[in-house]
Structure formats: C-alpha cells, structure tokens
Image (cartoon, rainbow, N blue to C red):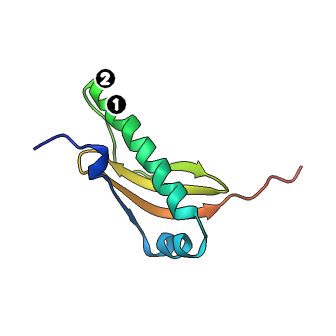
Amino acid sequence: MKPPVVEDLRIEASQSATLLLHVMPGLQAVIERTFREMFVSALELRRLHGAFAHDDRFLRTRVGGYVVSYLLDVDAALVRIMLIEPVRPIDG
C-alpha cells in the first residue's frame, strides 16, 4: 500500500455539517483549505517521527467564526467533519 499524499485526501461531512457548508458562502473552501494544510502537517509528522497516532475521539479546530469537530484518519487520507458550531463572543 502506497503512503497517502495530499491529493488522496477526502473530506466528508455529517448531514448537519453539510447543510451549514451549503448555506454559508465561502465556508466550505476555507474549511477544505484548512484541512489540506493540516493533512500536510500530519504527513510531515509521520515522516519525521515514523507514526501519527490517532484514535476515535474528535479533534477540534477553529476556522474563522466556527469550531469544527472532526476525525482525522491519516492512513485512509480522510477527514470526517462531524459538527460545525458558531463561536459565541465572550461578553466581558
């Protein structure tokens, strides 16, 4: 089996995440670019350290005004977006 490369990356989304991606102009492109960059970093970590550990817990990252919960499977070259939530400003 050949090692994954960025061009192999698939980005899938849950039904609720897909709905939000379709109604927010530009959000899908920003999220896709963000995850491609993160995948490049994961591949580099694997190259440098020989492994990239992951489990079935969600990872989270902030993309613009949203927090994106996702699963990353480097071996399968797959990002699965589970939830996209707007970030609420902290009143203070």
- Mark 2: amino acid: Leu
Query: Mark 2 highlights which residue?
Result: 48
Instruction: Out of 2 and 91, give the one closest to the viewer.
Output: 2
Crowd tier of the residue under label 1, counting other residues whose Cα lies within 10 Å: few below 14, some 14–19, many 20 or above: some
In percent of width and height, residue 80 lies at 38, 59
Crowd tier of the residue under label 2, counting other residues whose Cα lies within 10 Å: few below 14, some 14–19, many 20 or above: few
| The N terminus lies in quadrant | top left
Position of residue 33 relative to residue 20, above or below, is: above
Instruction: Out of 82 and 30, give the one closest to the viewer.
Output: 30
Question: In terms of image quadrants, where is residue 38?
Answer: top left
Q: Residue at x 44, y 52 (%)?
A: 58
SS at mark 1 in the image: helix
Q: Compute the Cα span from label 1 to label 2.
A: 6 Å
Number of numbered tags placed on the structure image: 2
Position of residue 3 relative to residue 31, above or below, is: above
Question: In terms of image quadrants, where is residue 88?
Answer: bottom right
Tag of residue 12: none
In percent of width and height, residue 17 lies at 50, 69
- Mark 1: amino acid: Glu
Which residue is most to the left? 1
Instruction: Out of 40 and 72, give the one closest to the viewer.
Output: 40
SS at mark 2 in the image: helix
Query: Mark 1 highlights which residue?
Result: 44
Taking 64 as reference, is 1 left or right?
left
Question: Given contact means CB atoms under 8 Å apart, are the residues at marks 1 and 2 in contact?
Answer: yes
In percent of width and height, residue 86 lies at 66, 62
Position of residue 7 relative to residue 19, above or below, is: above
In percent of width and height, residue 21 lies at 53, 69
Q: Which residue is drawn at 89% across and 49% down?
A: 92
